[in-house]
Image (cartoon, rainbow, N blue to C red):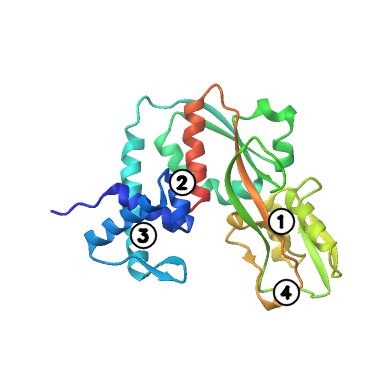
């Protein structure tokens, strides 16, 4: 009976999720030729091409997309088995600092699974602006901090993702093309600073109509038509829409933002490492 190589499947899934052979090789510690050989072996085994060459790029085709869904499920089962039988069982308290938008969109997707695998770990979560989470006086308050950092800033945190900053709002509501109403977090918020910086560089009039430090507080204001805001693309909740297209051409490009993980957990390094992996996987989905 034929058996698929989990290693080849993992390489294939990594290529899809990171968007290229070279990036997958960097992530997995393999050369690009080695990655290409793995994909060739996988294609030979299933008898289908998984990528089509378009220009200089290898683009996943229909068969590849079909295999991706099944490969992801196989790898999830494999990883769940190892997590379930990990020894010794992890226990203790972990203090996580996280911006409110990621607490809203990221934590719900990982916290249940983390709790199931590590039932003896008590997780204490604090939501705040990245600036506040990263102050020197707060370092001893957290074991792990997820925070936003401007691309130009040097940081001691681990870079998880360089994300796109996007305009978000309720696309069903009309927006003035000459006077932009903004719903923003208070001073010190990375999003607020970037939005104001970019709007000041052009002639479109703008004003701040509502301020709230929590994303849960911003969503109702946006849905009531008080204005629009900006978020990292990976943190946009289902209740809001990414604003794009000709209708929003007056809005300036907001550039990129770094999403970094800061590990201060010297007392429980195994627990920190476990939750870090869940966070990384959640952000890269």
Q: Residue at x 72, y 74 (%)?
A: 249
For label 2, count other residues whose C-alpha is less than 10 Å away and answer few (under 14), some (14-19) or many (20+). Answer: few
Residue 275 image position (x, y, % from top left): 50, 36
Q: Earlier in the sequence, mark 1 or mark 2?
A: 2
- Residue lying furthest top: 267
* Residue 268 visible in this rendered orientation of the protein: yes
Q: Residue at x 43, y 49 (%)?
A: 25
Of residues 52 and 105, which is closer to you in this image? 52
Badge 3 marks a residue whose secondary structure is helix
Q: Read off the residue under disc 2.
A: 27
Q: Earlier in the sequence, mark 4 or mark 1?
A: 1
Q: Read off the residue under disc 3.
A: 68
Check if mark 1's residue and mark 2's residue have beta carbons within 8 Å. no
Q: Earlier in the sequence, mark 2 or mark 3?
A: 2
Badge 2 marks a residue whose secondary structure is helix
Q: Earlier in the sequence, mark 1 or mark 3?
A: 3
Measure the alpha-carbon separation of dots 2 and 3. 18 Å
Badge 4 marks a residue whose secondary structure is loop
Residue 202 image position (x, y, % from top left): 84, 67
Q: Read off the residue under disc 4.
A: 249
Q: Earlier in the sequence, mark 4 or mark 2?
A: 2
Measure the alpha-carbon separation of dots 1 and 2. 36 Å
Q: Quadrant of residue 184?
A: bottom right
Measure the alpha-carbon separation of dots 1 and 3. 36 Å
Disc marking residue 218: 1
Measure the alpha-carbon separation of dots 4 and 2. 36 Å
Q: Earlier in the sequence, mark 4 or mark 3?
A: 3
Q: Which numbered disc, 4 or 1, marks the residue closer to the eye?
A: 4
């Amino acid at each position: 009976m034929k058996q698929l190589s989990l290693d080849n499947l993992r390489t294939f899934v990594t290529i899809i999720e990171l968007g290229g052979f070279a990036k997958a090789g960097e992530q997995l510690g393999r050369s690009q030729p080695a990655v290409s050989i793995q994909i060739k072996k996988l294609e030979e085994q299933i008898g289908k091409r998984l990528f089509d060459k378009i220009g200089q790029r290898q683009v996943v085709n229909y068969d590849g997309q079909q295999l991706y869904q099944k490969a992801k499920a196989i790898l999830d089962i494999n990883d769940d088995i190892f997590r379930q039988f990990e020894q010794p069982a992890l226990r203790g308290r972990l203090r996580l600092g996280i911006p409110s938008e990621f607490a809203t969109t990221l934590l719900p997707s990982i916290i249940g699974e983390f709790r199931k695998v590590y039932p003896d770990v008590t997780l204490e979560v604090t939501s705040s602006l990245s600036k506040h989470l990263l102050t020197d006086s707060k370092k001893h308050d957290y074991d792990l901090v997820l925070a936003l950092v401007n691309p130009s800033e040097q940081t001691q945190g681990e870079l998880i993702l360089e994300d796109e900053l996007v305009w978000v709002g309720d696309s069903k509501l009309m927006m003035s093309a000459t006077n932009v109403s903004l719903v923003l977090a208070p001073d010190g918020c990375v999003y607020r600073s970037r939005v104001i910086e970019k709007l000041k560089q052009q002639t479109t009039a703008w004003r701040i109509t509502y301020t709230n430090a929590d994303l849960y507080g911003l969503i109702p204001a946006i849905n009531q038509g008080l204005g629009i805001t900006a978020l990292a693309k990976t943190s946009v909740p289902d209740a809001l829409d990414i604003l794009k297209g000709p209708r929003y051409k007056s809005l300036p490009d907001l550039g990129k933002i770094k999403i970094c993980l800061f590990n201060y957990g010297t007392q429980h390094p195994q627990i920190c490492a476990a939750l870090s992996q869940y966070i990384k996987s959640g952000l890269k989905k």
